[in-house]
Image: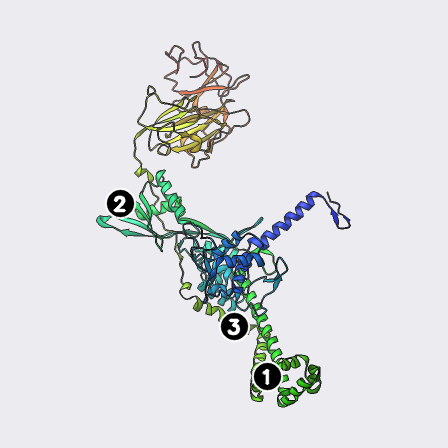
Amino acid sequence: MTSKVIKEDNIILTSFSQAISERYLSYALSTITSRSLPDVRDGLKPVHRRVIYAMMQLKLNYNLGYKKSARVVGDVMGKFHPHGDAAIYDSMVRMAQNFALRYPLVDGQGNFGNIDGDNAAAMRYTEARMTKAAELLLLDIDQDTVDFRVTYDDEGKEPIVLPSAFPNLLANGSQGIAVGMATSIPPHNIGELSDAITHLIKFPNASDSSIINYIKGPDFPTGGILVEPRNSIDEAYKKGKGGFKLRARWNVEKLNAGQWQIIVTEIPYQIQKSRLLEKIAELMDNKVLPMLSDVRDESAEDIRLVLEPKSRNLSPEMIMETLFKKTDLETRVSLNLNVIDDKNVPGVKSLKEALQSWLNHRQIILQRKSKFRLSQIENRINILNGYLTVFLNLDKVIEIIREEDKPKEVLISYFVINEIQANAILDMRLRSLRKLEEIELKKELTSLKQELDTLNNLLNDTDKQWNIISLDIKALKKDFGELINRRTSIEGMPEVEEFNEDQFLTKEPVTIILSEQGWIRSQKGHLESEFELKYREGDKECFRIHALSTDKIIFFSDNGRFFTVLANKLPSGRGFGEPLSLTIDLKSDNKILSCFPYFDGSVVIASSNGYGFKVNTNNLIAQTKSGKQILNVKGDVKAKICKKVNGDTLAVVGNNRKMVVFSIEELPELNKGKGVILQRYKDGTLADIITFNQDDGLKWKMNGGRQRVEKDLISWHGKRGGAGKIVPNGFPRPTLF
């Protein structure tokens, strides 16, 4: 359906849906281009660019003094960025953190936060200035190298992009989430980037593989070890999308008497040290890391996390492999080279494309700088020619200035010079007259003409342009000194035997108690039914299971899902325990039908409509809290029965008190599904199931408590899926075996 647009004076009538979609699109584009994604040329988002530009205007050079951060934030907010001061200061703080940026752009003085995740001090307490890297981003900005736009209030101008003599996009990386897209660029080593860029200048048609040969991988400010395979790294750089597996750096510290401890000296990028320690301690309390006896933080300026093993006979490599799997000592850093190009269009670029875009920008900067200098030289030559025209007639010049009402017009007419030359002569101070010597003027003029020729040759020769850019890039290595050394090493994934947690578990008898309201607890020892337990008001016992602390406890819900919990992970028997829903993802409207320790064998499961099958217990083990769907049920049909297979014969009874008996071999063994029909009902549902040996007979408890054994079952024998016959006299009510 097309919307009608009617214009009435200044009012546009349109459909509500069209108006909303147009405004949403406008908002999305604004978020993408003006907030969340960096520019491929300088690697900055608008807020970061404005902070650096404001610091330049405040003359906060890296070799000069500091000024209050509040001064910078105030200038950014007042001149360029009409948003809250918190967003501006947060961006400024990150630019100053040496654990967030590989090459910080702000030199902070005071508390700018730490790797533990502590916030920076208020902006009124901290001071800042630019770093050398930031000044390189601004280099030659005053020489018409970039375009400017008016600020939000039309009172000033701000740069659309910075000249960026420093490849900031890849050197420092960037993170951002926009509407419908995101960017994630890890930091890289400036030395490797310089080599790759130099190679690209020398060989413009170089392949992605040849470029990647110079860049080993990301280089994070916090160090660590990259364990991603080389082919995976190469593929990520070629596509501009992928990820890198990063691990903490550690070593073994020897102690007295053969004891030792593990020392973590570097943690993965963007991981808060305090939260990492809390997580490790929590896993230790929950017995997920039974191999550790203690963890503590002994960090000062350098990171030092101490991990004490429970036994010196353990392998430190095996311990660390377990920690890598279960904690943030190993993380995955994503790569999504999604950036804004010079046409203001977002898109994902490969590593080579990103480098080439920066090089193209640097070429444009060099050309614009040269043209700017060219115009300055031409203007100066024009003035010098004017000086040379009149320098021998200074007395006449002075006479004209003193006696004529309109000296400029007279000078132009008398000496045949242009207006610019005349203005220069008129603006000259008297003390400068002594400097007007022909030799000096001609010397300067010759020098400028030589420079003019050089610049014209440069602008007409792209090879010379690339030579100059190449020299500038090579100088980066010298400018950054020791900062060109890699902090993140690249190693292969070690092959270490998996850690066996079972060797640290104490094997002892326990009793698992589950109440009808879903509260669970574990008590030491095997408590018989005579042992009274306390329950919450209105609650009572549902299951009492004898097991071992090393057992896996299997739960079966009426939605057909099986759940697995280690016995030693269940809450202790103090109090009433905890809701089972905290341990497994059990919905409030679902009920546990059965629970039992894992055993090697099979069970029969069935739904209320009489469908079921056998399933091996190995298939019941669930690896997650959400469990494992084994029996498929829907609508009013619920899971009903789960019984251990213990015999060669199966008896099924419905609530219509009809029973059918058939061989267990007629029942298929499946991994999951609806199952097959066990008993057919016209006006009933499944009541109970039992397996037994034909020779031993069918046993059930009568109402009086006596046990009855029925061996003559010919009347009830039939094919699977039959309706069956009425149960024998004396069969209990309710209809259960």
Choose the circle earlier in sequence order: 2 or 3: 2
Q: Which residue is mark 2?
A: 313
Q: Which residue is mark 3?
A: 468
Three-letter amino acid code at disc 3? Answer: Ile
- As drawn, 587 above or below 60: above
Quadrant of the rendered structure where residue 392 is? Answer: bottom right
Front residue (pair 108, 702): 108
Would residue 407 appear left or right of 462 to someone viewing this image?
Answer: right
Query: Residue 179: x percent and y percent?
Result: 58, 49
* Residue at the far left in the pictured view: 257
Front residue (pair 546, 639): 546
Q: Which residue is mark 1?
A: 430
Mark 1 lies on a secondary structure that is helix
Mark 3 lies on a secondary structure that is helix
Query: Residue 137: x percent and y percent?
Result: 51, 64
- Cβ–Cβ under 8 Å for marks 3 and 1: no
Would residue 118 appear left or right of 44 to someone viewing this image?
Answer: left
- The residue sitting at 40% across, 60% down in the picture is 486
In the picture, which quadrant includes the C terminus? top left
